[in-house]
Amino acid sequence: MSGYLESCQSEFWKKVFEKELDYLLTSLKGYNDILSVGCGPAIIETGLEEHGFNVTGLDVSIEAFKKAPENIQKVVGNAENMAFTNLTFDAAVYVASLQFIDDYKKAVYETARVLRPKGRIVIMLLNPESEYFNSRVGDPYSYINKIKHVGLHKIEETINQYFSVKTEYYLGIIKERIFPSKEPGLTSLYIIQGIKK
């Protein structure tokens, strides 16, 4: 985990996190109580807090939470069995975390359960069609190798059971270059947004 936390401080990752935060700030406008699932050291969540959102981070890693800021409410636990009552949050976000969860179907069900009526979900999925993804698959140290689910449309079908969804490709990355793009082969993320049915 310490290697991951160190890499998060690189200029490249700071720019990626900035772009992801910008996207979330637009998507979450009008929502207040936000659940971030698989938040790790809560880098993006800190940015959300700074913009006035009330953020709760959920992660299985106690070690990651040790690096998270004090002002973020942190809950250690797994996404498949959330320790929250029904209708607790206005919105939920997964920033490149859903594909690493063992039972993503159960996690999506649990997310729908803890969201209030018309609650919003924003799921950023790593795009396996992208240059970014494929350039890292061969690297034995890359977090990409820990991914458990690459079938984006199967994940989308599951989310569509509980949410009215719209999708888009986002964030062009080639090597260390970050640029605007919606092209599947160039964009690192496939984003699913939904409103609870």
Image (cartoon, rainbow, N blue to C red):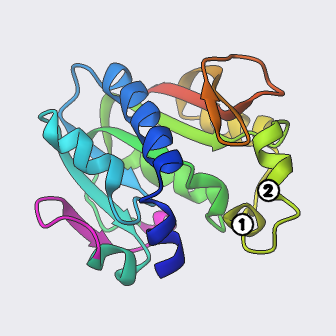
Q: Position of residue 166 (x, y in %)?
A: 59, 18
Does label 1 or label 2 sit earlier along the sequence?
Answer: 2
Q: For mark 2, what is the residue?
A: 136
Q: Identity of the amino acid at label 1?
A: Ser
Residue 133 percent across, percent down from the top left: 78, 47
What amino acid is found at the position of numbered circle 2 in the picture? Answer: Arg
Q: CA distance from mark 1 to mark 2?
A: 6 Å
In terms of secondary structure, where does tag 1 sit?
A: loop
Measuring from the top left, give residue 42's x and y in whole percent. 32, 58
Q: Quadrant of residue 83?
A: bottom left
Along the line of sight, which residue is nearer the eye, 72 or 131?
A: 131
Write down the region rendered in magenta: 67-81
Q: At 25% across and 58% down in the image, what residue appears?
A: 85
**Label of residue 133 in the image:** none
Q: Residue shown at 46%/39% (left/top)?
A: 15
Residue at image point 17% right, 33% down: 32
Q: Secondary structure at mark 2?
A: helix
Q: Tell me whether circle 1 and circle 2 mark residues in contact (CB < 8 Å).
A: yes
Which numbered dot is residue 142?
A: 1
State the residue in front, 151 or 163.
151
Residue 71, position in %: x, y?
Answer: 11, 60
